[in-house]
Structure formats: C-alpha cells, structure tokens
Image (spheres, grey):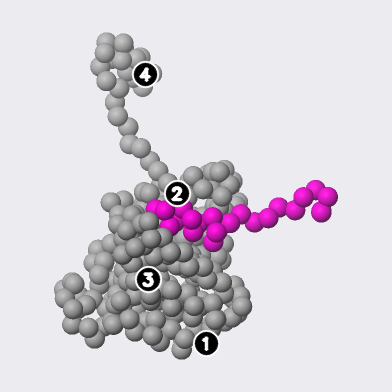
Amino acid sequence: MTGLLPILAAQAQLAGAPAEAMPLVIGQTFTLQSKALGETRRLNVYLPDAYADSATVRLPVLYMPDGGIKEDFLHVAGLVQVLVGNGSMRPFILVGIENTQRRRDLTGPTTNEKDKKIAPRVGGSAAYRQFIREELMPEVKRRYRTTAESGIVGESLAGLFVVETLLLEPALFDNYLAFDPSLWWNNGQLVAKANVPLRTQSGQPRQVYLATSSQGDIDATRQLAQILNSKTPRTTTCHYEPMPQETHATIYHPAALKAFPMVFKPKAVASPSAR
C-alpha cells in the first residue's frame, strides 16, 4: 500500500485536486518547567545551516525575550539567516523565550505608582534572570552544541531587561543589544545608579549596542552610552545608534539589521601569504 500512495497522489494532481499542504518547519521548539518562575515556558530555536552541515561544529547562542512565534522570533530568525548567509555576521543559535507575563518578567522593582499599574504584577526581573541563568542556559547547552559565547537582544521592556542584566550581572552574557530600552522605569533609577555596579565588572571582553527611535528614551540612553564608554574596563565597547527615522513600533528590525553585523561580525581570515 505504501508504494501506491505516490501514484494516487500523482493521479489526484493530474485530476486537478490540490496537493496536500505540509507543515513548513523553520526551527525547533520545546518547553521547560521552571522552578524559578513556577510555570512552564516555551522556547523557540533557530539553527543556522552551519550547525546542520556539521556534526561537530559548536556555535554561540543569542537569547531573546519576546521570542514567541507571534512576537519577534520569526523576523529575527530571518535576519540571522540572511546575514549569516551573505557573510555579514557569524552564525549564532537563536533562542526565543516566549512570553507568559511579559511586564512581570521584564521589569525590576519600582517605587513609581504609575509603573505599578501597567500589569497585575511587575518587578519580576530577578526571577526571570534566575530562570535564564540556572535553567534555560544549562538546558540549551545540554541540547545543542554551543560555545561559551552568548548574547541577549531585546526592545522596549525587553531592552530594559537587557540593560538591567548588563548593570547587575554583566558576566551573564558577552554581548548586550538593547533597542529603545524603557529606561524611564522606576523614575530612571537604573541609569542614575549605573556607574556604581559598573565599577565591579571584570575585564572579560564585552560588547554593548544601544539604539533609540524618535519615540525612545533618548536622553537616558545617550547618558548610559556615555557612562559605559567612560566607566567600564577597556575590554567593554559600547556603540550608540540614534535612529530618528524610526518609531518605537518600527525600530527592532532595522536596528538589528545594523547591530548584528557590528557585534557579531565574522572573524577575520588570514590571507595565504600571512599564514
């Protein structure tokens, strides 16, 4: 009967019947029960061709909050595919973290009463960071062939979480990318106190990329970039990209298009004469 199926399918097509639609697979997805968050979280993973083409290659990992299929995962995965394909960036494994209670997870504590009204629960960033550090990152290393290098990218409240993580736990990632970060949170205290935790950073190489749209917290982001460039070890580099032509709703894609080739630029290959 198995050998008859292709014949029947061919006959159906000849008769004008539409071919059966098949799922279009662009990556992998799995769930992880989190003790830190007290719930099950879904993770979406894009593996570049370099990973599938080799049984031994190990790749860095780029983590992204707002990483659901109906959030930012698809368009960021597409950017990684295009930029890796044309040689503009190194191949990275992309891990999207799908949201459950976004405003709870991506915000830190606040004394501002207006901040507290944006969701039933806010200020859960420490638990979310614990989930990433103690549960998600080990699971990704268990499932996939990874290197020690990692990065995190986010926009708006996710950008706020990226900056907060940089300032409070800088060794967690090697690369930090924040687009239109919501630095107004808690009356702007994150930037106001930025130079205190930054003094404790190690000398580990680290890259930071900040971008703002015409509707972003421009002054605070510019101030943060100035602090990062003046107060951090020389091994830390920060690039600030004003994008006044973009709005808060449009900045993610064009900012990532600029940031990825800069932060994740391909490693230089020595010419034959230099070897």
Q: CA distance from mark 4 to mark 1?
A: 67 Å
Label 2 Cα neighbours within 10 Å, binned few <14 / some 14-19 / many ≥20: some
N-term-proximal mark, 1 vs 3: 1
Q: Which secondary structure type mostly characterizes the magenta part of the structure?
A: helix
Q: Are marks 1 and 3 in contact (CB under 8 Å)?
A: no
Whether residue 271 appears in magenta in the rendering, the answer is yes
Q: Are marks 1 and 2 in contact (CB under 8 Å)?
A: no
Q: Tell me which residue sits at (55%, 52%) in the image.
A: 89
Label 4 Cα neighbours within 10 Å, binned few <14 / some 14-19 / many ≥20: few
Residue where numbered disc 2 is placed? 79
Question: Could you tell me which secondary element the residue under label 3 belongs to?
Answer: helix
**Image position, residue 249 (x, y; %):** 30, 57
N-term-proximal mark, 1 vs 2: 2
User: Residue 269 vs residue 212: left or right?
Assistant: right
Does residue 273 lie above or below 39 as drawn? above
Question: Could you tell me which secondary element the residue under label 1 belongs to?
Answer: loop
Q: CA distance from mark 3 to mark 2?
A: 25 Å
User: Residue 113 vs residue 80: left or right?
Assistant: left
Does residue 22 lie above or below 28 as drawn? above
Residue where numbered disc 3 is placed? 218
Residue where numbered disc 1 is placed? 199
Q: Are marks 4 and 2 in contact (CB under 8 Å)?
A: no
Mark identifier at residue 39? none
Q: Tell me which residue sits at (40%, 43%) in the image.
A: 26
Q: Nearer the viewer, mark 4 or mark 2?
A: 2
Q: Quadrant of residue 187?
A: bottom left
Whether residue 56 appears in magenta in the rendering, the answer is no
Residue where numbered disc 4 is placed? 6
N-term-proximal mark, 3 vs 2: 2
Q: CA distance from mark 3 to mark 4?
A: 60 Å
Residue bounds of the magenta highlight: 253-275
